[in-house]
């Protein structure tokens, strides 16, 4: 529980001495079930918490000052023991070290030590995230997402018209911290509209980069016919010279390489799954797009919520139909059909390729894309 007290109540309630914990502590009240998952950790806990915290860097007139956003010095996990927060793929922990290289991650034993002192603990700066409390927000049931309520918080968003070098929005400090620490550089592009990669030399491309995340070795995947259709359609775009296509099974390459691939991408395509969480490391632009393939008729908000926060355009694909919602509008409810987690997902590759063409050329017509559903 959180209790707000007045200065007059301070000593009677908390005593006349305290242990002072300097700098920035991030306290995460969450359970291993969700913490040990790449999407839930980075796409809900970190993203939602950082969205709220980024208000520290926002002036009343909307000017964003990312330099005000001190990175956390420690993460406290009061409920978790024995590394239960780590995901099976071992992605969460290493990416935390890359984004927050100076921060300690302390589990329940640390929290119990503080409790056993039976003393008042004062945190100089603290951010508290609590999944149970977050779901009490009126939007929690609307999208079924921990971060739903944070979408009401006014933050610095991706704004291509801004003269500020930090037009990329509230997430840019974390994306840049992780990318720069892990790769040693930030890829540069020709412009927000032209996503050819200029530097570094090892990543240069004279065409925008499209990354297709191949999930054919997992349980939730395309039929073999649909996968072949996707590959054929994408390779045709590459051969035509419209884009450079990267087809990758993320589980077969190292974590550094995974981040490198998405950091140079303009568009990411894939079946609903953890790989789409990597959009967190794709720079926003006028062309940045996430195309999420699901079993037709199904709808989930996981990666749409990420895309909206990042400044990427998001599409759900139902076979040959691509669905998108403009800012301020949303699909009505979550729909998880029987085939959602199956190996029977099907898609018409040429329809996806056509949308990629439109996005890269800037010729799509958004008003016509949302069907009556």
Image (cartoon, rainbow, N blue to C red):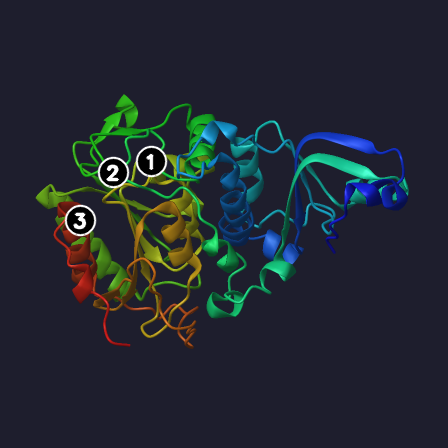
Q: Secondary structure at mark 1?
A: loop
The residue labelled by disc 2 is 161
Q: Are marks 2 and 1 in contact (CB under 8 Å)?
A: yes
The residue labelled by disc 1 is 167
How far is mark 3 from mark 2, CA to CA?
33 Å
Q: Is residue 163 above or below residue 267?
A: above
Q: Quadrant of residue 223?
A: bottom left
Outermost residue on the left side: it is 240
Q: Nearer the viewer, mark 3 or mark 1?
A: 1
Nearest to N terminus: mark 2 or mark 1: 2
Nearest to N terminus: mark 3 or mark 1: 1
x and y, in percent, of residue 82 in the image: 73, 46
Q: Is residue 200 left or right of residue 142?
A: left
Q: Nearer the viewer, residue 32 or 246?
A: 32
In the rendered image, which quarter contains the C terminus?
bottom left
Q: Secondary structure at mark 2?
A: loop
Please name the residue shown 38% across and 24% down the image. Answer: 185
x and y, in percent, of residue 332 in the image: 38, 73
How far is mark 3 from mark 1, CA to CA?
33 Å
How far is mark 2 from mark 1, CA to CA?
8 Å
Nearest to N terminus: mark 3 or mark 2: 2
- Evaluate whether residue 217 shows in this view: no
Tell me the tag on residue 235.
Answer: 3
Please name the residue shown 16% across and 60% down the image. Answer: 350
């Amino acid at each position: 529980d959180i209790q707000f007290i007045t200065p007059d109540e301070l000593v009677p309630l908390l005593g006349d001495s305290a242990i002072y914990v300097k700098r920035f502590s991030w306290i995460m009240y969450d359970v291993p079930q969700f913490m040990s998952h790449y999407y839930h950790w980075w796409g809900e806990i970190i993203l939602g918490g950082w969205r709220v915290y980024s208000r520290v860097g926002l002036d009343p007139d909307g000017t964003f000052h990312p330099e005000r956003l001190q990175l956390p010095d420690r993460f406290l996990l009061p409920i978790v023991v024995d590394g239960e927060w780590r995901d099976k793929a071992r992605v969460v922990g290493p990416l935390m070290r890359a984004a927050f290289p100076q921060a300690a991650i302390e589990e329940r034993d640390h929290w119990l030590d503080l409790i056993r002192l039976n003393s008042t603990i004062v945190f100089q700066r603290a951010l508290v995230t609590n999944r149970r409390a977050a779901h009490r927000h009126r939007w929690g049931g609307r999208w079924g997402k921990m971060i739903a309520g944070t979408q009401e918080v006014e933050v610095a968003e991706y704004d291509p018209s801004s003269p500020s070098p930090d037009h990329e929005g509230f997430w840019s400090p974390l994306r840049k911290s992780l990318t720069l620490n892990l790769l040693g550089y930030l890829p540069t592009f020709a412009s927000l509209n032209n996503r050819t990669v200029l530097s570094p030399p090892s990543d240069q491309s004279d065409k925008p980069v499209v990354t297709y995340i191949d999930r054919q070795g997992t349980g939730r995947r395309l039929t073999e016919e649909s996968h072949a259709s996707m590959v054929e359609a994408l390779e045709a775009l590459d051969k035509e010279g419209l884009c450079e296509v990267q087809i990758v099974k993320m589980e077969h390459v190292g974590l550094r390489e995974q981040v490198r691939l998405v950091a140079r991408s303009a568009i990411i395509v894939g079946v609903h799954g953890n790989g789409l969480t990597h959009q967190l490391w794709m720079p926003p632009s006028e062309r940045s797009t996430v195309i999420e393939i699901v079993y037709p008729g199904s709808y989930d908000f996981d990666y749409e919520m990420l895309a909206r926060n990042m400044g990427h355009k998001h599409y759900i694909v139902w076979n040959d139909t691509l669905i998108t919602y403009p800012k301020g509008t949303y699909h009505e409810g979550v729909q998880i059909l029987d085939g959602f987690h199956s190996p029977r997902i099907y898609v018409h590759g040429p329809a996806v390729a056509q949308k990629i063409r439109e996005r890269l050329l800037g010729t799509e017509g958004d008003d016509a894309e949302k069907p009556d559903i």
